[in-house]
Image (cartoon, rainbow, N blue to C red):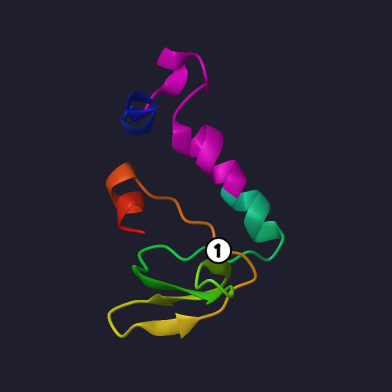
Amino acid sequence: FMLFAIRTEASVLRMLEGSPQTGLHDPIIAYLEERGVKINLKSACRDIVHEVDENGLPTRVKGIKVGPKNEYREFDVVVGALDVPGIKKV
């Protein structure tokens, strides 16, 4: 994965013709934006706000707190793309 992530030419792995940005990312972004999806980049997630069950365990995500002021935001869907050290913090 790391080779794929840092190389500009993914054809070395015979997965894409050209760069990952033009062959993978741009088509996905276009598909989502055509359907009204807003992609928020460079918005640091400070906390995941969720409901809890009777045992105090998290069940359903309600929203996230983002930015330096911990602004609470609700979304229909939240997709988090994190590296391994980042996911360990969540």
Q: Is residue 42 left or right of residue 18?
A: left
| Image spot of residue 18 (x, y percent) | 47, 25
Q: Quadrant of residue 23?
A: top right
Is residue 20 inside the magenta stretch?
A: yes
Task: Tell me, yes or no, whether the highlighted magenta stretch contains residue 85.
Answer: no
Classify 49 as above or below 25: below
Image quadrant assignment for residue 13? top left
Query: Percent from the top left, x then y, of residue 49?
Result: 47, 76
* Residue 53 to residue 9: above or below: below
Pick the front one: 42 or 78? 78
Query: As drawn, is 77 to the left or to the right of 55?
Result: right
SS at circle 1: loop
Q: How many marks?
A: 1
**Residue that appears at 52% across and 42% down:** 25
Q: In the image, is residue 56 above or below residue 22? A: below
The part of the chain drawn in magenta is: 8-28
Task: From this view, report whether residue 14 is shown above or below residue 37.
Answer: above
Percent position of residue 39, x then y = 52, 63
Q: Outermost residue toward the right?
A: 35
The amino acid at mark 1 is: Val
Residue picked out by circle 1: 78
Nearer to me, 69 or 21: 69
Q: Residue at x 38, y 76 (%)?
A: 66
Image quarter where the N terminus lies is: top left
Residue ranking furthest to the front: 55
Residue nearer the viewer, 63 or 3: 63
Of helix, strand and loop, which mostly describes the magenta segment? helix
> Dividing the image into 4 quarters, which one contains the C terminus?
bottom left
Give the class, few, some or many, for how many residues have Cα within 10 Å of label 1's Cα (few <14, many ≥20): few
Q: Is residue 39 left or right of residue 90?
A: right
The picture places residue 87, in percent across and down from the top left corner, at 36, 51
